[in-house]
C-alpha cells in the first residue's frame, strides 16, 4: 500500500473509532503502560513528546512528571478525543499537535524524551519514525517504544500480520524485535532496557473495535479458526463452541537513549 493510502486509512479508521480507544482495555491499562514512567525516570523540567498519542494514555501518565507534554497524532479527531480525555483527567500541561510520525514538525534536539505506544504497526516506514525520534531527541534523551511485534518465524509473522490487517485496514505491518533493534542502532539509539510481553485479547472486543460489518468480522474469525497448529499454539487461540474466544499476541517494550 502506498504511504499516502496507508496514512489515509489510519486517519479514516482512527477518526471513526476514536472514542473506543479511551476505554479499550489494551490501550487504557497494561503492564507496558506502567513501565513508561519508571523506565524514563522523567525530570520536572522535561519536555516530552508522545508520538501517535491516540486517546492520550501515555500523555496522561507523563503529565504530572514533566513540564510539558506534546501529544502528537496524525488524526485530528483522535487528538480532539485525547484532549477531552486529558482535560477531564486534570492534565493542564499538554499541547496537541497534528503530526506525521515519519516527518515530525519539530526542531532537532527539542525533546528530553519521546514515547510511542501501540501505534508503530500503522506506520508505512517505521525506520523513518525511529530516525525522526532520534533527530528530535536531545543528546542523552530517552525513548520508550511499545508495540505489538511479529514473531521472528516468517510463517507466524505472516499469519499475525494478515490477521491484524483483515481486522483493521489501517494495519500496515508489525515488525519483529530484531528489526526494531536494527533500526534503533542505525539511528544512533542505544538500547538500555527491554521486555517482551504477552497480551491476551478478548476476541469479540478486539475484532469489534475496528471492523465495519458482520461479514468482515466473520472473515476475521474464519481466518483465525483456520490457523495452522503452530499458529494456534503460539498465539494461544482459544475456541469455545466453534467460536474464537481469545487470542494472545507478543509485544515489546524498549528503552533507548540517544548517544
Image (spheres, rainbow, N blue to C red):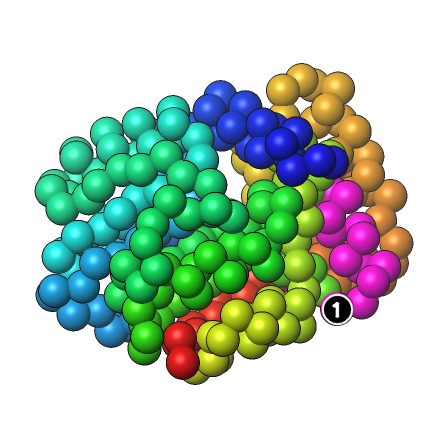
Q: Is residue 247 left or right of residue 228?
A: left
Q: Position of residue 142 (x, y in %)?
A: 35, 71
Residue pictured at 16% horizontal, 60% vertical: 66
Would residue 208 be seen by someone viewing this image from the given angle?
A: no
Residue 192: image location, x then y, percent: 43, 82
Left of 199 or right of it: where is 106? left
**In the displayed structure, would residue 140 be above or below residue 122?**
below
Residue 43 picture quarter: bottom left
> Depth check: 93 or 201 in front?
93
Residue beneath disc 1:
152
Q: Quadrant of residue 136?
A: bottom left
The quarter of the image holding the N terminus is top right
Q: How many marks?
A: 1
The residue drawn where x is 60% and y is 28% is 9
Q: Quadrant of residue 122?
A: top right
Q: Is residue 156 magenta?
A: yes
- Residue 104 in the image: above or below residue 13: below
Q: Position of residue 52 (x, y in %)?
A: 43, 44
Q: Residue at image x 59%, y 59%?
A: 127
Magenta highlight range: 152-163
Asked if one can make out residue 123 in the rendered structure from this viewpoint, the answer is yes
Where is the C terminus found, in terms of image quarters? bottom left
Residue drawn at x 11%, y 65% as measured from the top left: 44
Whole-percent x, y for residue 198 in the image: 57, 63
Dot 1 falls on a residue whose secondary structure is loop
The rendered magenta stretch, by its main secondary structure, is classed as helix
Left/right placement of residue 129 relative to residue 38 reads: right
Residue 72's place in the image compared with 251, above or below, is above
Is residue 138 depicted above or below 56 in this figure?
below
Q: Nearer the viewer, residue 233 or 210?
A: 210
Amino acid at each position: 500500500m502506498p504511504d499516502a493510502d496507508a496514512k489515509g486509512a489510519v486517519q479514516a479508521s482512527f477518526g471513526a473509532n476514536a472514542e473506543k480507544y479511551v476505554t479499550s482495555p489494551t490501550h487504557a491499562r497494561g503492564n507496558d503502560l506502567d513501565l513508561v514512567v519508571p523506565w524514563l525516570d522523567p525530570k520536572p523540567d522535561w519536555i516530552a513528546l508522545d508520538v501517535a498519542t491516540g486517546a492520550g494514555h501515555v500523555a496522561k501518565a507523563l503529565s504530572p512528571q514533566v513540564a510539558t507534554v506534546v501529544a502528537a497524532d496524525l488524526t485530528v479527531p483522535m487528538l480532539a478525543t485525547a484532549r477531552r480525555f486529558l482535560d477531564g483527567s486534570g492534565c493542564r500541561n499538554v499541547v496537541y499537535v497534528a503530526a506525521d510520525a515519519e516527518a515530525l514538525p519539530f526542531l532537532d534536539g527539542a525533546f528530553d524524551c519521546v514515547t510511542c505506544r501501540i501505534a508503530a504497526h500503522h506506520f508505512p516506514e517505521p525506520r523513518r519514525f525511529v530516525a525522526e525520534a532520534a533527530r528530535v531527541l536531545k543528546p542523552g534523551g530517552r525513548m520508550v517504544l511499545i508495540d505489538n511485534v511479529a514473531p521472528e518465524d516468517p510463517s507466524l509473522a505472516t499469519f499475525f500480520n494478515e490477521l491484524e490487517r483483515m481486522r483493521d485496514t489501517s494495519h500496515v505491518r508489525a515488525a519483529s524485535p530484531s528489526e526494531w533493534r536494527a533500526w534503533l542502532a542505525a539511528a544512533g539509539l542505544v538500547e538500555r532496557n527491554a521486555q517482551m510481553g504477552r497480551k491476551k485479547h478478548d476476541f469479540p472486543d478486539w475484532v469489534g473495535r475496528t471492523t465495519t460489518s458482520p461479514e468482515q468480522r466473520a472473515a476475521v474469525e474464519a481466518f483465525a479458526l483456520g490457523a495452522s497448529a503452530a499458529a494456534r499454539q503460539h498465539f494461544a487461540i482459544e475456541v469455545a463452541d466453534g467460536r474464537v474466544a481469545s487470542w494472545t499476541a507478543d509485544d515489546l517494550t524498549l528503552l533507548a537513549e540517544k548517544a
